[in-house]
Image (cartoon, rainbow, N blue to C red):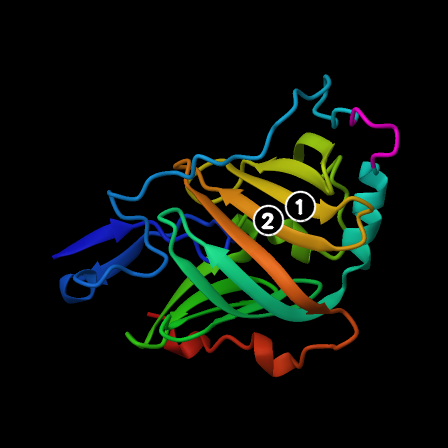
Amino acid sequence: MRRQIILTACGLGFAALAATPLAAQQTPHPLSITPSAKPSAARPAISPTTPGGTETAATTAAAPSIDQVNAYLNGLTQLTGNFTQIGPDGARTEGKLYMRRPGKLRFDYNPPSPLEIVADGKSVILRDRRLATQDLYPLGQTPLKFLLADHLDLRRDVVLKSAKLEGDAFIVVIEDRSTFGGTSRVALYFDSKVTSLRRWVVTDPQGYDTTVMLSNLDTSRRPDDKEFVIDYQRIL
């Protein structure tokens, strides 16, 4: 007996149809959205957009601009760091993050989670070390693909829903209508001067939120090519 489960992998937010043996279903997958899981009640505030989908001006004159966000993200060509993920059911997992643009990303989850997520520039795999499986998805169907693009323009490349300063955070909310399973929403949280990306929240097409908080980011170290290798011979 097999069933479809929705995986929200490290805030990548792609809806994946993963066929899981019944024996593996007895222990809930750390990133599975089970029927008992509820969408998070906490959602970033979303301001109405101006006609044409451009961002709403922040109420404070000192608020950053979308041009500043574009410049920051386009300058973020490589990084390593740590992440803490909070899933839709409140489950908390941690691990190590590697990124190198364009297209390359890796999340190594700390035990007891068996997961690894690797993007090599064209595909993303969700690898389960315990089950010895790899599930393959097109990178272009994940809502955070824009973070890995060679160049990004938030006004042109995504649907920009809002951009506003709230306390010590500048929050940019975008929508991606081309993700697997439907439209996903991503909220990016920067510091108030847009000098660092602190976290993101992905709302998947089913309305479930996954939060990924970043720490100990190092943009001076270039991750090695071996961190982003996908063994296509092992894909099931």
Looking at the picture, does residue 6 appear above or below residue 116?
above
Q: Are marks 2 and 1 in contact (CB under 8 Å)?
A: yes
Relative horizontal placement of residue 234, taking residue 147 as reference (left or right): left
Check disc 2 and report the residue beneath it: 200
Dominant SS type (magenta): loop
Q: Residues within 10 Å of mark 2 (few under 14, many from 20)?
A: many
Task: Please give left or right for residue 90 compared with residue 1 in the image.
Answer: right
Q: Residue at x 16, y 62 (%)?
A: 26
- Spot occupied by residue 46 in the image (x, y as percentages of width and height): 61, 27
Q: Quadrant of the C terminus?
A: bottom left
Going by the numbered disc 1, the residue's amino acid type is: Tyr
The one of 104 and 67 positioned closer to us in this rendering: 67
Q: Which residue is mark 1?
A: 189
**In the rendered structure, which segment of residues is drawn in magenta?**
58-63
> Relative to 71, does residue 61 appear above or below in the rendering?
above
Instruction: Return the x and y of residue 60 as percentages of the image width and height.
Output: 83, 27
**Residue 128 falls in which quadrant of the image?**
bottom left
Amino acid residing under circle 2: Trp
Label placed on residue 131: none
Q: Is residue 16 left or right of residue 212?
A: left
Is 1 above or below relative to 47?
below
